[in-house]
Image (cartoon, rainbow, N blue to C red):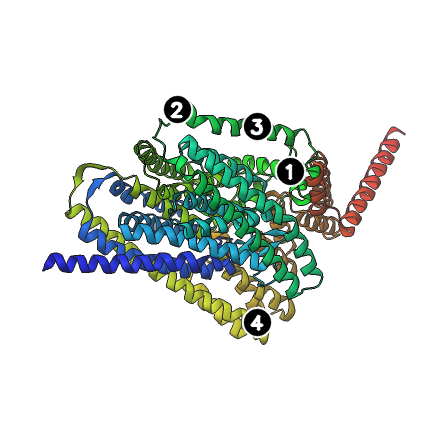
Amino acid sequence: MKDGLNRINTRWIFAATSVFVVMFLFLAPFSKGLFVGYEITFERPLYVALVCSLVCLTFICVYLYREWQMASHGDILVALIWIIPISYFIATFEAITSQWAFIEAFVRLGWGVFFVLGYYITRHSAGYKILLFALIGSGYVIVLFGLLNWFGNAHYTDAVLADRLSSVFQYPNAYAAYLIAIAICALIMVQSSRKKRYLFFHAFMLVPVFLSLLLTLSRGALLVLFVVLIFYLALLPWKRQLISVMELGIVGIAAFAVYGFAVKTRGQLLENYSPGVSLRGWLLVLGIAAIASLIVLGVRLRFGRLDNNKPDKLWSPRRLALPVVLVSLGLAFYVLIMSNFPFSKILPAGIAARLEGVNLQSTSVFLRNTLYEDALRAGAEYPVFGAGGGAWSVLSESFKSYPYSSSKVHHFYIETYLESGLFGVIVLMAILCYVFVLLIGQIKKKIRETNDDIRWLIFPVFSIVILGHSFVDFDMSFFYLSSLVFLTLGATAAISNRPIAVIWSKGRVTKVFASGLFLVAIFMIYKCIVALRADEYYRSSMNVLAETGNYDAVQSAIEQAESLMPGHSQYLLSMAKLNQLMYREMKNESYSRTAEYALNKLKAVDPYNIEAVEINYDLDMDRMNLDRAHEVVRRAVELFPWTIGFYEKAIELNLRLGADSTLSDDKRSDYLREAGLLADEIKRRIEIIDDLPETERVMSRGVFGLNDNLQAQLQLLDAIEAIRIEGNERVSMENKR
């Protein structure tokens, strides 16, 4: 009877967690991919997703308490995965920006939840199928939704960004990485489907997937696609490789055939939206997809028996021949790109322009290399445990080599090093290596089999694609994508799992671990709910400010929000800004004291916050506390050396103090000398900008340029210097006489 109840409880937990995963896969991406963007607008969807994930974790803990034992490599990974969030929670003790350090730590806790979900759901045969079809099905929904926006049938914010398709992610490169993963998954389904209708359906969907990939105009994604295809093909017998290449060729030709028309249709819809034009675009895409899928189906019916060959060795010459040929073709293509080959003669204009713009000095390559170098320099200041989550969003102002703007490092592993130090990177890489070592054992086992079903490859391929593309972009900053990575890593661990000698059976150690994890989940749920409540207060304060401008109501709502989330940067910033503006208008000292309180508290939790420094300077100038304003702006120039506005404020204030007749001559000379040094520093930094590649130079001069006020200040400095030199020469002449 007891065993029967345990089975019922286990089934209930399996059903609840499976429903959560399916709902997450289909619903979560429509909240901007749950982007961790270091702005308050991104917080609420993240907290909601984290609450649901942590509730799911409590179910998992109940299962672990009842059933968990250390009897396989997968069970060990279930324990080790929690070191990743621990590394981020450790980093919060010396975090540069405490609010986002905690949120990033919460996000890593969510990664652990999804890893364990992937592991335990996939171990169940029904769960394996549910996860497989939900992963691919949600991908197809996102692809179709993206095209709905392209053809003007939906209007999701930034789903088309600067003529590049980005769908729910609002960032074309991240969407391109996701599309590659879905494309390989669809190709695997085509290879594994034995029923004609399933084969036709997945082949049909491959065309809009590849069309969407072309519409993202992502160069890095195309490189990752090529590498992943080589990896995928190398796992197949050589005859199946040939069939796969044929199918890819058919789909690729179809996607290229419709690409130009899709771009033209988009242009027409932007000029004058017409349902007829939109419908014509859809009919062409779906028609070409249907034709291509029929051809693929014909290829499978004609040549399908060829792939039932006997298995050969993993490193056999026949298995490696086609991948080697493709690598050679890829290298030849790279040489063409570097030699400025005119791709416009053979490729559509948009794709050709993107390829022709690639070289070692191109904007994207140069910027990324600079980003990596600057982030590594910043990370060297916090080498062991890191500077906490979100560190680059504030440290970039101090460490960047020229005035670019990027709150992300565009490299997941370097960003992990900066945020969690060597400890965090080693933990992450160790767990990834552990999973992929298990995968290699699974591959060696499957290579010896003649089974046509290769759907198990979908899970490792999905995670490999996103993790691979994360070497050149910030895909893992989308909680939706990073959750899918750890979900599929957990699934990979499940399908690659191997038993070991039992370390711990069901007993005290495993029960204590599960109980501790349960208490952590409950505490974190509480913290997330408190954060959501604080967010409600803050949003209400902004609504009151916009509708009535009632100071007391706004201040009260912000104080309530800040009391629930002490040290929240945005709440403190809003409080400081509101009271600084009220003081400027009313000259009531209570406002300035409240503003100063918020600024001092903010300085303790977010010392590199550039907005706080600006408010602090404005407050001191409003109070005519010029000495303190001078110290603030001097520190600002040191912390934010590429913010031209601080140079302007500093020079203007030094000139003002240098002309103050109440000060001694030596003091006034010091202020004027400091203004001159600042002017020299501006010229030095402009020289640095002038050595940049053209696109970066133009962009940087637009950010670090001289406005009319600053030019007038520099001219005044030159005039003062000329007068000083003339005076010195006159004194020298008189002394000679």
From mark 3 to mark 4, how far is it between C-alphas? 59 Å
Type of amino acid at the residue the image marks with label 2: Ser
Q: Position of residue 151 (x, y in %)?
A: 61, 59
Does the residue at mark 3 contact the one at mark 4 (Cβ under 8 Å)? no
Query: Which residue is under mark 1?
Result: 355
Which of these two is toward me, 513 or 309?
309
Which labelled disc corresponds to residue 316?
2
Q: Earlier in the sequence, mark 4 or mark 2?
A: 2
Mark 4: which amino acid? Leu
Q: Residue furthest left?
A: 1
Verify CB contact (< 8 Å) between mark 4 and mark 2.
no
- Which three-letter amino acid code belongs to the residue tagged 3? Leu
- Is 366 rendered above or below residue 171? above
Instruction: Report the residue marked by disc 4.
Output: 545
Q: Residues within 10 Å of mark 4 (few under 14, many from 20)?
A: some
Q: Are marks 3 and 1 in contact (CB under 8 Å)?
A: no
| Disc 1 to disc 2, C-alpha distance | 35 Å
In the structure shown, which secondary structural element does the residue marked by tag 3 occupy?
A: helix
